[in-house]
Amino acid sequence: MPLPQQAENTELLEQALAALAEEAPERIDALLAGLHAAQVADLLESLPPEARTQLWERIAPGAKGDVLIEAHGEVRRQLIDESGPEELVEAVRRLDLDALSDIYDELPAGVVEAALRAMDAQRRSRFQTVRRYPDDVAGGLMDVDALTVRPDVNLHLVLDYLRRYRLELGRLPAHTDAVMVVGLDDRYVGRLPLADLASLPLERKVQEVMDREAAAIPADTPAGRVARTFEDRDLVSAAVVDEDGRVIGRITVDDVVDVIREEAEHSVLAGAGLDEEVDTFAPALESVRYRALWLGVHLLGVLVGAWVISHFAAAIDQLVALAVLMPVVASMGGVAGTQSLALVIRGLALEQVREGNRWRLLKKELAVGALNGLTWALAVGLIGSLWFDNAKLGAVFGVALIANLLAGVALGTVVPLALHRLRIDPALAGGVILIAFTDAFGFFVFLGLGALLLV
Amino acid sequence: MPLPQQAENTELLEQALAALAEEAPERIDALLAGLHAAQVADLLESLPPEARTQLWERIAPGAKGDVLIEAHGEVRRQLIDESGPEELVEAVRRLDLDALSDIYDELPAGVVEAALRAMDAQRRSRFQTVRRYPDDVAGGLMDVDALTVRPDVNLHLVLDYLRRYRLELGRLPAHTDAVMVVGLDDRYVGRLPLADLASLPLERKVQEVMDREAAAIPADTPAGRVARTFEDRDLVSAAVVDEDGRVIGRITVDDVVDVIREEAEHSVLAGAGLDEEVDTFAPALESVRYRALWLGVHLLGVLVGAWVISHFAAAIDQLVALAVLMPVVASMGGVAGTQSLALVIRGLALEQVREGNRWRLLKKELAVGALNGLTWALAVGLIGSLWFDNAKLGAVFGVALIANLLAGVALGTVVPLALHRLRIDPALAGGVILIAFTDAFGFFVFLGLGALLLV
């Protein structure tokens, strides 16, 4: 049985496809009216490109900005390509500044300039602060609308300030769960949670009740580290400070959730050589570009294995059972290595695997490989002996399997550590390298031993 | 260069190892004093099991509960096993109720009973509410300490209520960013954000200013769906309601972040047959249990491929080049299939792949497979022809490659969809099934064509 909301989504998709096919704009509009931006973006991503264009044209210009932000990579690019410059300016000019900064580089140059001209001076200068940082550090994730108060005022005054702010601007910044407390030169000294403001006597001074322990995040902190900090300390928001400790913005948990989600998608896709930006429903021709390259890289790896085999053609010629069993040796080494690889990649992401424990990890993985090797060597040795009625073949099969399982776990541990050190993404490159080696080594050991001992 | 906090973590690990080796308890205590629970758990997980025991003994009993919550699967079990019953009761009795519920099943029976007896009646009854739901639905994730107010009171009264609450209990519930508004029978009617409470005139009534749009989450909603709702709507907290719409708790974003992180770990590890609970530094003997099974499952898959090869022993005997090239055909099909598999698994997780677009996706993947097949068939055909100076062999090589790439993308699309329908985790089982098929089919097509046309 499908889950309730999934049924709803499926229905939504079908309704949208039907309305688009029948060119019934009023039904499309009615459909769109009930959805929030993330749902519209989901729907667009589930549609084929032509239907996507049709639906996009029915979305109100003011609402398009939020939908663009929620849409991913290639889909977002398609939508931008299909929009006129005035339409884009209208779509993006009221966006949160960190959101605008995220899609800044994807927008045509004229659009960005027009959107900047339409901003007031304060908003423009704040935007320039955000732009100073790349997207993948705290400074690029932050909102620049942090509310700040001085430590020596009382809570009554803070409430007054919030009421005046709201009267003037209509609302407090999104996800305000605290105001930041700043000293001279806007330097960060702590934070005052709204929960305290709403539950403590109003005569108390900010400095008596503020949370001095709450960490401020340096603007150049990598996004992954920011996410770990939020997770470990269960934060909802945190101040972002520049190199002098001045508060220049704040990060809220919804931005962090996006970071974690992207990491999760990356870990699913990178192992297959895919980018998390990739559009599941992109036309086949576009998808081929990415994927052909990855197949080519793998082909090089497998050809090394084939080249190894070719050196043992004489042995195979004499004992064809070698050809039958050699893929088993090669692929079992790959599978054992993939297990070590997955553990080390997770350990690196969670920062559990460090300088101080790498050797211990390698020793442990080798022990696991040896134990698994012994277990399965007995099994495959028996299988090989009985199948081909050749005990010596079974023994060679088992010994080669142990050797390749050991090679697999050793490489599965060492390769990601080395790649991490070289600042190459182990999730992307680890698997290809591992499989190329375990294939070639598996063939070499099994056929080599076979040539020496069996023919 | 290591990142700053990583250096810090590495140093921490080294200091801990040194202090433990020298049996210097006061240095260990000084080290622990500066860390919060998640950091202590991280450190414990990075240590070998014996050092872990030593460190665990130095942690204050009252602090052990939070550390247990932050520790993962096997590490947590080790720590529980090594603690006495009184120590555990002391550790868990002040935990948040949803946290206590999470580790409930792992605690010895006597400990749970003693902890329940130590609770007052209200806390015990709330705990029983949480226990009614499994861990992986909204009811199992929720905190039961939601603050609720009536819609017909004014904001002044709400502030008074919060102040009294705090005076009595010392603090508001963690992550209170809003109070829930309930009507008769505790039925959910909306929420009042603290940001509104702190910035609107106090004479206003709750019902005039409350957010009626904010969704309440039914207690039986799966955790993954809860996470998607929080992400899409940028929520910090949401009310949880029972089947009658009564507020029985609230979910806060920190619980959601844990769900997303677990999903991310799952996606890295499941493909290698590992559980996200697995301890990276577990003793080799324990790790073998999990991993031997997975190798055995793979072995069955590869043996099917070997069995296919054995039927073509005569052909290989006559043309040993077939044995050299056959692993290339088999593994390229697996790689192409893995790409489709990764895309579909992501699409299913994000609910982009649905009833209405599955056929479109399959057609597109087949087109990608055909295009990639043609490209690389030309390349490998040429390689095969030149290498063995045999144009017919090259042609068979190329045709078999196209066939296996098509089989790979078709299976990579259909297998996860079918597994999802059968409620089997595609991330866990998809890869094994795919590789077993593409290996066997690749050998069959290439060797079959070879036997027919080349020998």
Image (cartoon, coloured by chain):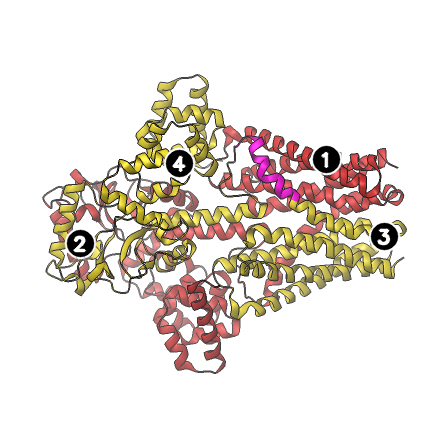
Chain colours: A yellow, B red
Over which residues does the magenta segment extend? A281-296
**Closer to the eye: label 1 or 3:** 1
Marks 4, 2 in one chain: yes
Q: Which residue is mark 2?
A: A198
Q: Nearer the viewer, mark 4 or mark 2?
A: 4
In the image, taking residue B245 as reference, residue B320 lies left or right, namely right
What residue is shown at x 65% (from left), y 38% (from top)? B408
Our reading of the magenta stretch's main secondary structure is helix
Q: Position of residue A33 (x, y in %)?
A: 32, 27
Respond whether the residues carrying marks 1 and 2 are from the same subunit: no
Residue ID for mark 4: A107
**Residue A41 at x, y percent in the picture:** 41, 34
The secondary structure type at the circle numbered 1 is helix
Q: Chain of mark 4?
A: A
Which quarter of the figure is the C terminus of chain B placed in? top right
Q: Name the residue: 51% across, 60% down.
A: A348
Q: CA distance from mark 1 to mark 3?
A: 37 Å
Is residue A264 toward the left or the right of residue A200 in the image? right
Mark 1 on the same chain as mark 3: no
The residue tagged 1 is: B378
Task: Tell me how far mark 3 sits from mark 2, CA to CA.
Answer: 80 Å
Q: CA distance from mark 1 to mark 2?
A: 71 Å
Q: At x 54% / y 40%, what residue is drawn? A: B343
